[in-house]
Image (cartoon, grey):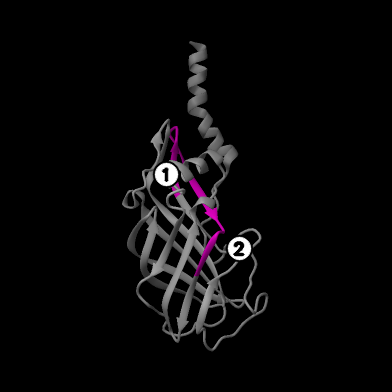
Amino acid sequence: MIGVVALAALVAGGPFVYINFIEGDPPAKLSLDSAPAPGGTATGPAAGATAAYTTADGTWTVAAGSQAGYRVKEVLFGQDTTAVGRTSSVTGKLVVSGTSVPSADFSVDVATITSDQSPRDSQFRGRIMETSRFPTAGFRLTQPIDLGSVPAEGERKTYQATGELTVHGVTRTVTVPLDTQLTGGQIRVSGQIPVTFSDYGVEPPNAGGIRVENNGIIEVLLDFARS
């Protein structure tokens, strides 16, 4: 009986100890204040310098240091925790014409998204996201963004972006606020896109004491350099 009680305490208390004393806090949400991804540096013509633009016209391409990933609530044997996975394998571009952004898109290599737990990553790439069938996810702007005016160097502005979000082979129209900043010869864009996984044919795990919420967030931090 003592052994059974000890085992029960271990099962109940193990996740609590791990989550609260070993795992630590999850990474902060991606934002304009986030550092570039490891190994990422500014690559624009004015990298490392202060740029002043009277126009931002032209094509801007996703540069090194960009990141994308997910943030979702998990319940591990009754203990709440937050799972975060990210990748720097992001490509895409945006076009600025006058005070409008007529087109923009980005694509993420889903199979390269990793968290702090390799078993979680195996499940993510396998039966959850089926990356062998759906290797990429992405967003494509479907309505132009009106900038109003060209932002000054360092100025932060938030715009509403409407477009098609594709996850797990399913495409849906979403509208998301994007925080932007023109700085150091680059355009930085960050956004938090709420998603309901079942809307995209994704079935969150719910077995063996592990349950993942049906709602989560897609996080992006994109650095665009002038092509």
Q: Quadrant of residue 35?
A: bottom right
Q: Is residue 138 above or below residue 58?
A: above
Identify the mark at residue 100; answer none if there is no mark. none
Q: For mark 2, what is the residue?
A: 36
Q: Residue at x 42, y 41 (%)?
A: 127
Q: For mark 1, what is the residue?
A: 128
At label 2, the amino acid type is: Pro
At label 1, the amino acid type is: Ile
Q: How many residues crowd around disc 2 within 10 Å: few (fewer than 14), some, or many (20 or more)?
A: some
Query: In the displayed image of the protein, which residue is found farthest to the front?
Result: 133
- Number of numbered discs visible in the structure rendering: 2
Q: Position of residue 101 (x, y in %)?
A: 43, 79
Q: Quadrant of residue 139?
A: bottom left
Q: Position of residue 178 (x, y in %)?
A: 44, 69
Q: Secondary structure at mark 1?
A: helix
Give how far apart the Cα atoms at labels 1 and 2 are.
28 Å
Range of magenta residues: 72-92
Q: Residue at x 54, y 89 (%)?
A: 54
Q: Nearer the viewer, residue 153 or 199?
A: 199
Q: Main secondary structure of the magenta part?
A: strand
Q: Is residue 144 above or below residue 22?
A: below
Q: Position of residue 3 (x, y in %)?
A: 52, 13
Numbered disc in front, either 1 or 2: 1
Q: Residue at x 44, y 72 (%)?
A: 104
25 in magenta: no
